[in-house]
Image (cartoon, rainbow, N blue to C red):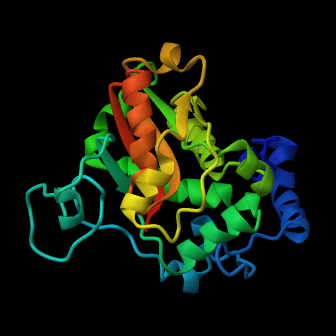
Amino acid sequence: MTNPRQNPTAGGWGHLLQKPLHALLDLIYPLRCAACAVRLTDSGDARTDFCPGCAAELVPVKLPFCDTCGEPFAGGMTAPFKCPNCAGLRFDFDFAISAWLSTGPLRQAIHRFKYQRCLHLRAALARRLHDAVADSRLVEMHAPDAAERWCVVPVPLHSRRRRERGFNQSAELARLLARATGLPFRDLLRRSRYTTAQARLDRKERLANLAGAFRPARQAVRHLQGKNVLLIDDVFTTGSTTHECAAVLKKSTHAAKVIVLTVARG
């Protein structure tokens, strides 16, 4: 459904009715902070999706950061580098990008979206996800013909967990990113095996837990062969899930590149 806030009628009566319409929408569906849910004011904070207090606590990922997993580091490094966590590891994705750290208000907003079924927060979080495409390594995806060579693929949920949650948070974010960038959305990965929660497992345990858990959809090879894939998830923690997804994308569908984009870096 089209959002009336984003599609005002230009000129004539539409222009005269625009402010009253917005006032009515604010009365029925008041804009609220994505983290603390306080009502947003008309002073400009509505454009950030967070109230001034929460917006001030958002922590961006700034250089220098690991060229593989995107973890930021303090220091004066000017050349690309691998962090100690990635130095001895092999990832099947090319690199991972997050524009924000999963702390404070952003972490709270992600949890509200993911676990409390606050589906309306998908737009606010998709905007934080979109911030990551400014990375200089993604310059090719801004070319006029990028839609022929790039696509957006969400990390899948098992059907059982999707029924429990009501939606796949990664797919919701990926659809909005695809719309914002003009790249095709391809929901072509499947989670074929139900796995236990990953939160309390270390990387070795996570990899064992995820082994063989993903497979390509029937049409995956036709749509993904030779393409550069933006693999979308909400939070990057150890990279275990996205590593397994990237392995399937490269080995089974012959994707050219797999770049992981997440809302936040855990």
Residue 131 seen in the figure:
no
Percent coordinates x, y for residue 226 in the rendering? 36, 18
Name the residue at 36% across, 41% down.
Answer: 259
The quadrant the C terminus occupies is bottom left
Vertical comparison of 75 with 26: above or below: below
Asked where in the image residue 155 lies, by quadrant, the reply is top right
Asked where in the image residue 28 lies, by quadrant, the reply is bottom right
Percent coordinates x, y for residue 92 in the rendering? 32, 40
Vertical comparison of 154 with 264: above or below: above
Residue 69 seen in the figure:
yes
Relative placement, left or right, of 37 versus 132 is right
Relative placement, left or right, of 150 versus 234 is left
Vertical comparison of 25 with 259: above or below: below
Name the residue at 52% across, 81% down.
Answer: 104
Q: Nearer the viewer, residue 85 or 205?
A: 205
The residue lying furthest to the top in this view is: 222
Name the residue at 38% across, 35% down.
Answer: 247
Relative placement, left or right, of 115 versus 126 is right
Vertical comparison of 212 with 78: above or below: above
Asked where in the image residue 218 lies, by quadrant, the reply is top right
How many numbered marks are there?
0
Q: Nearer the viewer, residue 262 or 143?
A: 262
Percent coordinates x, y for residue 34 in the rendering? 66, 71
Percent coordinates x, y for residue 86 in the rendering? 23, 58
The quadrant the N terminus occupies is top right
The residue lying furthest to the bottom in this view is: 53
